[in-house]
Image (cartoon, grey):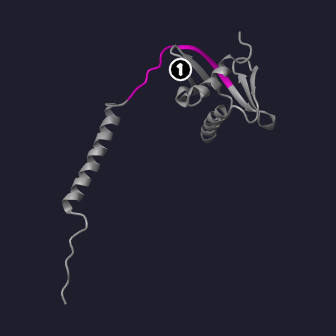
Amino acid sequence: MSQTVQEPLIPRGGLFAAAALVLFALAAVATARLTGTGGVHMTLPAAVESRDLNFADGQSGAVLVYDHRDGQLVETLAPGSNGFVRVVLRGLARERKLGDIGPRPPFRLTRYANGQLTLTDTSSGKQIDLAAFGSANVGAFARLMMAGARS
């Protein structure tokens, strides 16, 4: 009986090349992370206006929007409306729940000189650039900036 020697399916040179590529990619990522080289850093222009808001669940699925400064109800989002606002708030509320943070710290809605609008969770510092989701969705939050009587 004779035994047949089979050649490996992947040539040894190909394995070395793949390993070298993986190591190079890991080294490049580590270098970029540690030195900041190649990273994109967005600097926001000056804030023109901001408003701290609190959100609470109302009856029948409504979302109640309060001005944090004076506790005044500024808007009631009817059930089945304002889907984008609800999704953003649900995501932020989930993060607060995981961090064992209550509903008391406000969310800061900020408009910048270039018209950009952001929503920041003041408890975690997480900031969402609302323009990334389209102008119709920005408009949903822009209405909250002006909602209710402000002095």
| In the image, residue 138 lies in the stretch drawn in magenta | no
Picture coordinates of residue 21, whole percent (x, y): 26, 49
Q: Quadrant of residue 49?
A: top right
User: Is the C terminus in the top left, top right, bottom left or bottom right quadrant?
Assistant: top right
Please report the residue visible at 36 percent of the width from the left and 31 percent of the height from the top.
39
Q: In the image, which residues are magenta? A: 40-53
Tell whether 141 sits left or right of 24. right
The total number of labels drawn is 1
| In the image, residue 52 lies in the stretch drawn in magenta | yes
Label 1: state its secondary structure.
Answer: loop
Q: Quadrant of residue 109?
A: top right
Name the residue carrying label 1: 116
14 vs 24: above or below = below
Q: Quadrant of residue 5?
A: bottom left
User: Is the N terminus in the top left, top right, bottom left or bottom right quadrant?
Assistant: bottom left
Looking at this rendering, what residue extends furthest in the right direction? 59
Picture coordinates of residue 69, whole percent (x, y): 69, 18
Q: Residue 71 versus residue 4: which sits nearer the camera?
A: 4
150 vs 19: above or below = above
Looking at this rendering, what residue extends furthest in the top direction? 151
Please report the residue visible at 60 percent of the width from the left and 38 percent of the height from the top.
95
Picture coordinates of residue 30, whole percent (x, y): 32, 40
95 vs 16: above or below = above
